[in-house]
Amino acid sequence: MHRFFVEENQIDESSITICGDDVNHITNVLRLSTKEEIIISNRQGQEYCCIIDVLEREFVKCKILSVQQSIQELPTKIYLFQGLPKQDKMELIIQKSVELGVYEIIPVVMARSIVKINQQNKEKKNDRWQKIATAAAKQSHRATIPRVTVPMTFDEALQYAEKLGNIIVPYEKATSANDSKEIFLQASNYDTIGVFIGPEGGFDEIEIQRLITMEASIVSLGKRILRTETAGMVVLSILMFNLEVE
């Protein structure tokens, strides 16, 4: 069943009004008609099973059939601090991390980042990244659309991460896989977790030392060196499994 997202002010007691780009998608791309059922999310965890009632050029009005709380979202909010990689890699990382349940994605310009973004390009890139996150959220039946922030400096990212319950950092020089397993098993003890991933060139030693100073958990992902677009997906997959399997 097709899924769409709306703001709270688009919902009343018995109906929901869809506006914007989704109207064209419903009418001209999907070619849906009245009496067809769709799922609408309020971005806060509630899902509405609806039937299309009115199709107009500027809006689509849907009648609410039932409402339920989503079970798609992870109980722990995961923040992915991704060392800024090349453009195509960042788009892949956003798409797959949304599918794996990430709550928020924070691109971070690190010491060894190959790509540098000037102030003028930040908002333009962020708009595209957010559209990719929205499409991935719809495809994977998420109840919320993960936010993609504008790129931050490493200092800004550390300050942003201070509020989180735990920070996990996969690092190729981490030695104990057994300790890493225990860290992942304790994921459900936290309401929020930050995951820091280095860019193509990896973490600078000073960056790792600063994360250790913040009492981040440095973990090993095995004996192989993983690419930046792989490492985050592995961490998210492990966390998703540990958080969802009782």
Image (tube, rainbow, N blue to C red):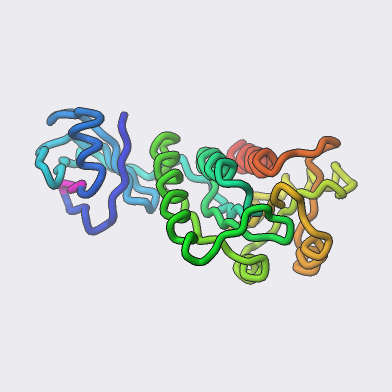
Residue 17 lies within the magenta run: yes
Label the magenta part by its dominant secondary structure: strand
Residue 175 in the figure: left or right of residue 4: right
Residue 167 lies within the magenta run: no
In percent of width and height, residue 219 lies at 79, 49
In percent of width and height, residue 95 lies at 51, 40
Relative to 214, residue 79 above or below: above
In percent of width and height, residue 172 lies at 83, 46
**Figure label count:** 0
Can residue 154 be seen at all in this image of the molecule?
Answer: yes
Give the residue at x 58% y 39%.
244
Identify the residue at the far right of this view.
175
Give the residue at x 80% y 39%.
225
Q: Quadrant of the N terminus?
A: top left
Relative to 56, residue 199 above or below: below
Kindly indicate the quadrant of the structure image that contains residue 192: bottom right
Q: Quadrant of the C terminus?
A: top right
Judge by depth and name the residue closer to the eye, 195 or 150.
Answer: 150
Can residue 246 be seen at all in this image of the molecule?
Answer: no
Judge by depth and name the residue closer to the eye, 62 or 80.
Answer: 80
Give the residue at x 47% y 51%.
146
| Residue stretch rendered in magenta on the structure | 14-18
Residue 10 in the figure: left or right of residue 171: left
Relative to 25, residue 20 above or below: below
Relative to 187, residue 163 above or below: below
Kindly indicate the quadrant of the structure image that contains residue 117: bottom right
Kindly indicate the quadrant of the structure image that contains residue 68: top left
Give the residue at x 68% y 53%.
114
